Image (cartoon, rainbow, N blue to C red):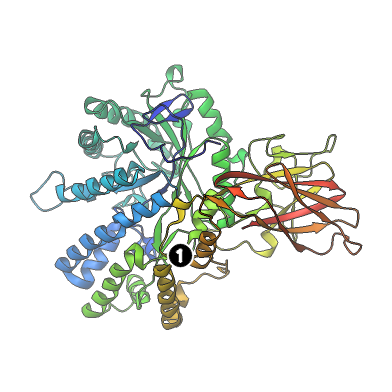
Amino acid sequence: MIHPDDHEVSGFLYADGHRLRNGDGRELLLRGVGLGSWLLPEGYMWRFPEQGDRPRRIEAMITALIGADGAEAFWETYYDRYVAEADIARIAAEGFNSVRIPINARYILREEEGVSGWHEEHLVRLDQVIGWCREHRIYAILDLHGAPGGQTGTNIDDSARDVPELFTDERNKQLTIAIWRMLAGRYKDEWIVAGYDLLNEPLPDWFSQYNDQVMPLYREIIVAIREVDARHMIILEGVHWATDWSIFEGLPDNKLPDDNVMLQFHKYWNNPDTESIQKYLDARERLNVPLFMGEGGENNKDWYAGAFRLFEDHGISWNFWTWKKLDTDNSPCSIVLPQGWHKLVGYLEGGVKPERVEAQGILDEYLLNLSLDNCVYHADVVRSLFRRLPVRIPAIFYGYKGSGLSFGRASGRQAAAGTGFREEDGMDFRFVEGDRTVPNFQHGRGQAWLPEERLCVSLTEGDWAAYEFTVAGRDSERLRLGDKEGLRERQESRDSEDAPELQSLEEPGDTQESQDTRVLEESQDTQGSEDRQDSLALELRVLMSGPDSELLVKLDGQEIGRIHGAASDFGQDWQTVRIQSGQRLEAGSHELTVSAAAGAASLEWLDLR
């Protein structure tokens, strides 16, 4: 694992074989968040239905409700508040070293009748955020999320007709090339810009007839960029939500269009295991380039604890999607739902149009709630990404470094029957209850695993599993607790006032506990004045197979406890066992190892504080 430090954000980034290096030549991984829905508003982050699923539809609704002048004022305030310096400062304070900035082409293009060219006022706002990134020392990735005409042909690129018109109209290609030439010329000397992400998620498979146009367009864009900027890294995505890398196969001499390239994939709603990313690991070897998991998230915190450890252990830079959205508990920042929001949803679905004054009031409250200080902050989301104490780790997500490093099986033991998850490890995975045979990791709203979806790892004598986690230093959690307590009070008040109105927006089964400001305060209390934690408080959810079974628990190689089966243990009753270590923990990375010293036992999760 490449551990972050205070000096890794320094100078122009560049690709060096499999590795990413900073301007000092030091290897690093990008660990960042996406600023989704800022310059390209996405309807699902507003809790809107299909009729409001993309910028142009949201814009049309707001104009219809409050008029063109009111809409113009709304959007300028929206852009100013959705991402402010406080957001960038918080992202940096949490230990992230980068942000990915999704850009809609329409945001930077003049659209007034008879006027063409760049929207300089909007570009100045982009300059400002990049300046904040420099001030707080986090790299900024420029991501063309919505190219002219649309590279995807869906809501996520602000498509006008659900067709990828970037590939059907040469004028859109030339405008896309011009955009990148302009951005590269503007930021050619800005080292805090990590690189240029040329196209977000081009061409889902139902538009695969255009796949052969992607690499030629990439090449044209790169040529235009290199005319004005020789230093910035180029970031290329595959097709079909960035998961299909067939466009990078069959290249002459296995050479990409530039020597300073990083390849990007996205990962949502599937197994967090090595098998699921093997094709990208193979491409890294074949093409000798660094990898970037540029979007992953929209799941529950248990999945985060597994998936982002997967990226870390395989030396893959990553970016969490997304930093902020409306009424959520699976992103760090939750915008408080305004009173009457359901009326906007109803109007989009063909219902009654709110009066202008009422609509203005709802939208004004939304704008007020956008600021970081007015959001509910879910520190547990961030902790799950970094495995930073306090954190819960599902036992199935032991490390991904391979046999002998992250896990071990007793000599001669046969591999267990597979569940379709981490099968190459040969470990014994079982469902805690029920009769499922295949895991389900599709929890897009952050719902907790259902009882029948929960998995455990079964260890027999000689088996072991290792779990890395981190302890924060003093500077990474200097957050304003008083403000956060006030935010929680406002959230609780809003929930009680508006609860009857919000029922249509709730999803069944969305009951996962949220540990936001309360746990954040607890985590700060455990930090000593010398960047260390007094000790580790550990809980393990275990099922002992019988009175002769025994689990051995070690912290950084030192035994901290044993769990013994009891006379009544015959593989029937799960129990939560607590262990308190006596050793002090320095800030940084640590490893907890659980092994079967005798008999057999199953392990469902570990809670570390």
Q: Residue at x 53, y 25 (%)?
A: 285
Residue 467 in view (yes/no): yes
Provide residue 507's location: percent of width, then percent of height. 52, 69
Of 112 and 536, nearer the camera is 536
Question: Residue 284, relative to residue 205: is it above or below?
Answer: above
Residue plotted at (68% across, 49% down)? 396
Horizontal side of 222 relative to 272 (left or right) equals left
Residue 299 position, x and y percent, is: 53, 56
Q: Which residue sits at x=44%, y=51%? A: 475
Residue 139 horizontal side relative to residue 539, left or right: left
Q: Residue at x 16, y 66 (%)?
A: 68
**Residue 364 quadrant:** bottom left
Is residue 269 visible to the viewer in this orientation of the structure?
Answer: no
Q: How many marks?
A: 1
Q: Secondary structure at mark 1?
A: loop
Name the quadrant containing residue 147: top left
Q: Residue furthest toward the front?
A: 529
Q: Is residue 360 above or below residue 79?
A: below
The picture places residue 523, in percent across and down from the top left corner, at 54, 60
Query: In screen coordinates, is 201 left or right of 81?
Result: right
